[in-house]
Every structure is written in C-alpha cells, then in structure tokens.
C-alpha cells in the first residue's frame, strides 16, 4: 500500500509542473477546485431551500450554455460550408437571401436579440403554449446560439479561405478527392479543430454572460405583461431575487464596517455565492481560452 501511495504522489508531483505550464488545464483545475469548495461550504452553512435553488440554477445555466455551443457549432458549420458551396450549385440565387438573413442577425446586438427571444418564450409560457421545462431550456439555448454563432461562421470561413489558397487543396482535387471531404475533413477537422474549440470556449463564456444578463433583466420585471413565469431558474434569475440583492448590498456595507466582513460568508451566502459563480466562471473561461490559444499557438 505504501508503494502505491508513493507512486501516486510521484505521479502527481510530476504532473504539477506540466499543469502549471499549460494554463488552460491549470485554470480548469482551479475552477473545479473553487466550485467544489464553494459547494461544500454552502452545503454546510447555507439553508437547504436556498442551497437547492442555487444548485438547480447553476446546473440549468451550464446546461443551457453547453447546448448553446452545440447549436452554435451545428449552425456555424452548416452555414459556413453552405456559403462556400452554394455559388457552385444549381441554386446560386439562394446566396443573396441567406447573406441578407445573416447580415440581419448580425445587425442586432446580441443581448437585445436574446432579450427579445426570452420575452417571446415568456409570452408563450403565459399563454400555456410552453410548459415542459426541458423544451424551454432547449429553446432558450437555441435562441442564444442564434445570436452568437456568426462569430464561429466568420472563423470557419476564414479557415476555408486560407487553406483554399494552398497547393494541397488543388492536389487533392486532381487526385479525385471530393471537395466536400477536403473542406469538412482535411481543412476543418484535421487542420482547424483547435481554432474551433478555442472559439467554442469563448462562446461558452459569452453564452453564460448573455443568459445571466437577460435572465436578470427579465426576472426583475420588464412590465406587468412580461414576467419570468415558470422559467427555469438560472444564476441570473437567482441574482435578481430580493435576498440576493440584499446580500450583495451587504458587501458595500462591509466596506465601511470592516467588522461585518466575517458575517458575509455565513449570513449572506445566497447572493455572494451566485455573484461569485458568475464572475469567477467568466474569468475562468477567459483564462482557459487564452491558455488554450497559447498552448496551440493559435
């Protein structure tokens, strides 16, 4: 047993320098450690109803962000490849309306577009046209993806245009390899996957920011006609709760009353935990993206 422990210790000790050198993996480890420690602290000191709400909000937020990048990848890949092949098809006239639609989406600020989509979902819920929570989560994730996937489209089209200028593409065409395989497999999958993954990491952070911001706006109430009825709880809606607002205000109070700081981690956990999860996750996603790009020299 002692030899096994020594082997494990040596393995961990040997991995630490490598982990420190790879900043993206380091920040993943830091994020996981911080979230685990925060979960344990809240499990001990936060009242159970608030703990379950934060836990559910955290899971819903990350599920929607994950679905958002999945939808973004599917939309961006198919759109970018479609824009490349449409001029050479039997229906080149489709290029103009498709470009018009994409430019129309691009002209709408992301947060405004997602907000309008969330309001539409809320209206459908109030009209009893939407009731299944899973369907609502998928729909909200798709709405968010609809206003962020163009960033990935631009990247994919740039990679295709870059490799189209190289000789290996013409050589493959002369060998009888289909252009669709060259674009999808040789260019995008084999030579651009790291770039796509790096952009997806960034879009994951963007999706969390947009969802939390819009959920906060919708939750505080845009009007008497629009309210977050039956919307899945997220970190943004948790931050809009009156208890969370009071907890955040307690931070400002502690700046002028230093002796009150010790109470923050015991009496104001709901708001502080929610705010920390949002801010620290966005910071971690930024650091992970930067570390990933440097490690792959993008």
Image: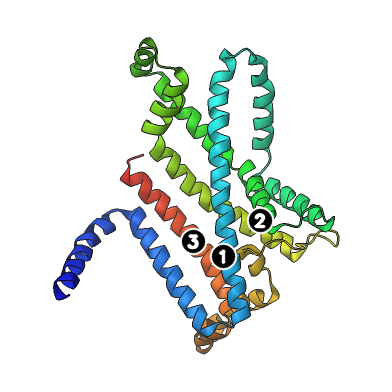
Quarter that holds the C terminus: top left
Quarter that holds the N terminus: bottom left
- Which residue corresponds to the image point at 74% horizontal and 63% vertical from the top-left? 230
Q: Which of marks 2 and 3 is nearer the N terminus?
A: 2
Say whether residue 292 is left or right of residue 111: left
Q: What element carries label 1?
A: helix
Disc 1 marks which residue? 58
- Which residue corresponds to the image point at 70% horizontal and 75% vertical from the top-left? 242
Disc 2 marks which residue? 134
Q: How crowded is mark 3: few (under 14 residues within 10 Å), some or many (20 or more)?
A: some
Which residue is nearer to you in this view: 270 or 132? 132
Place of residue 257 in the rendered image (x, y in percent of width and height, measured from the top left)? 55, 86
Disc 3 marks which residue? 281
- Which residue corresponds to the image point at 77% horizontal and 50% vertical from the top-left? 120
The quarter of the displayed image where residue 148 is located: top right
Disc 1 versus disc 2: nearer the observer:
2
Report the colour scheme.
rainbow
Q: Is mark 2 on a helix, strand or loop?
A: helix
Place of residue 112 in the rendered image (x, y in percent of width and height, measured from the top left)? 70, 48
Indicate whether 238 appears above or below 160: below
């Amino acid at each position: 047993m002692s030899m096994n422990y020594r082997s494990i210790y040596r393995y961990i000790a040997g991995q630490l320098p490598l982990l420190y050198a790879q900043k993206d993996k380091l920040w993943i480890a830091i994020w996981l450690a911080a979230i685990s420690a925060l979960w344990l602290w809240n499990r001990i000191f936060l009242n159970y109803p608030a703990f379950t709400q934060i836990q559910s909000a955290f899971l819903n937020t990350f599920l929607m962000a994950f679905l958002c990048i999945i939808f973004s990848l599917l939309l961006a890949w198919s759109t970018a490849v479609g824009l490349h092949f449409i001029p050479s098809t039997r229906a080149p006239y489709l290029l103009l309306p498709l470009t018009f639609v994409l430019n129309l989406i691009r002209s709408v600020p992301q947060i405004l577009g997602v907000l309008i989509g969330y309001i539409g979902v809320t209206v459908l819920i109030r009209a009893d046209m939407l009731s299944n929570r899973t369907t609502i989560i998928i729909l909200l994730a798709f709405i968010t993806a609809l206003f962020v996937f163009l960033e990935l489209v631009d990247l994919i089209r740039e990679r295709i245009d870059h490799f189209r200028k190289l000789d290996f593409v013409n050589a493959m065409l002369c060998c009888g390899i289909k252009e669709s395989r060259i674009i999808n497999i040789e260019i995008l999958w084999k030579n651009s996957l790291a770039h796509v993954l790096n952009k997806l990491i960034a879009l994951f952070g963007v999706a969390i920011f947009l969802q939390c911001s819009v959920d906060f706006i919708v939750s505080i109430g845009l009007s008497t006609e629009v309210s977050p009825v039956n919307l899945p709880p997220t970190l943004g809606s948790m931050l809009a709760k009156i208890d969370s607002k009071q907890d955040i205000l307690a931070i400002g109070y502690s700046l002028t009353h230093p002796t009150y700081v010790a109470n923050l981690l015991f009496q104001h956990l709901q708001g502080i935990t929610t705010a920390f999860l949002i801010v620290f996750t966005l910071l971690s996603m930024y650091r992970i993206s930067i570390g990933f790009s440097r490690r792959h020299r993008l």
